[in-house]
């Protein structure tokens, strides 16, 4: 058994057909996956679709999960890959209006304290290049360590640190301009 026996137990139960176990997995990680997809894609229908697809992909391949990584990390990797695929799929870098809100994404979200700040952060993130946005979403918004972020993105630690520093440099003037 891997390093995360509780996750492995839930997955094993789901594999044997225990629908409640899979529902428990979705319930436990839905908000985390939503934060990743919204952070990557903006608060849009696409983010909701990618979030649902994350769990569908996991459901189809959950027998491969061995517990070597936390289930949250495993699902985050799926969500990142699907979000990156969605960004590539878009023919232009048009952004769906960030004014469009899906309350269910933020219903139990304790990270964002008010709607104005959420909108401001989403607008600022949408202006960042994807390589910087990904690091910010994982490291700052999701709270992964720098090492975990590097592992999730398959990047050297130094690259993650430099992208994070550059992202913060780029975000300062963007946020100042948006606050005016």
Image (cartoon, rainbow, N blue to C red):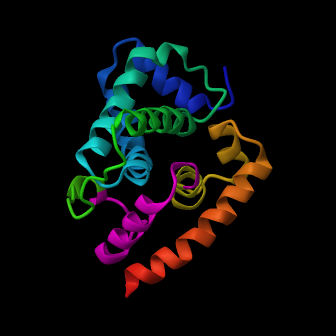
User: How many numbered tags mark residues here?
Assistant: 0
Which quadrant of the figure contains the C terminus? bottom left
Residue sitting at 67 percent across and 24 percent down? 2
Q: Nearer the viewer, residue 131 or 37?
A: 131
Instruction: Tell me where residue 35 appears, x and y as whole percent.
Output: 41, 52
User: Which image quadrant for residue 102?
Assistant: bottom left
Magenta segment includes 45: no
Asked if residue 68 is positioned above or below residue 46 in the image, the reply reads above
Magenta segment includes 118: yes
Q: Residue furthest front?
A: 92
What span is in magenta? 106-132
Magenta-drawn stretch, dominant element (helix, strand or loop): helix
Asked if residue 23 is positioned above or below residue 36 in the image, the reply reads above
Q: Residue furthest bottom?
A: 180
Instruction: Tell me where residue 157 appears, x and y as whole percent.
Output: 77, 48
Asked if residue 164 is positioned above or below residue 59 in the image, the reply reads below
Asked if residue 82 is positioned above or below residue 165 in the image, the reply reads above
Q: Is residue 63 left or right of residue 4?
A: left
Residue sitting at 62 percent across and 52 percent down? 144
Residue sitting at 26 percent across and 53 percent down? 96
Q: Is residue 42 left or right of residue 135?
A: left
Instruction: Tell me where residue 95 appears, x and y as whole percent.
Output: 31, 53
Q: Nearer the viewer, residue 65 or 10?
A: 65
């Amino acid at each position: 058994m891997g390093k995360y026996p509780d996750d492995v137990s839930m997955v094993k139960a789901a594999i044997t057909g225990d629908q409640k176990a899979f529902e428990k997995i979705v319930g436990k990680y839905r908000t985390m996956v939503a934060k990743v997809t919204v952070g990557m894609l903006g608060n849009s229908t696409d983010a909701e679709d990618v979030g649902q697809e994350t769990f569908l992909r996991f459901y189809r391949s959950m027998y491969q999960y061995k517990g070597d990584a936390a289930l949250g990390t495993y699902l985050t990797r799926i969500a990142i890959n699907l979000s990156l695929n969605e960004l590539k799929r878009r023919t232009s870098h048009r952004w769906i209006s960030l004014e469009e809100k899906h309350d269910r994404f933020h219903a139990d979200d304790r990270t964002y304290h008010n709607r104005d700040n959420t909108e401001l952060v989403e607008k600022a993130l949408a202006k960042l290049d994807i390589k910087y946005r990904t690091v910010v979403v994982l490291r700052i918004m999701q709270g992964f360590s720098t090492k975990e972020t590097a592992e999730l993105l398959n990047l050297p630690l130094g690259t993650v640190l430099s992208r994070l520093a550059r992202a913060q440099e780029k975000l300062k003037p963007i946020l100042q301009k948006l606050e005016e």
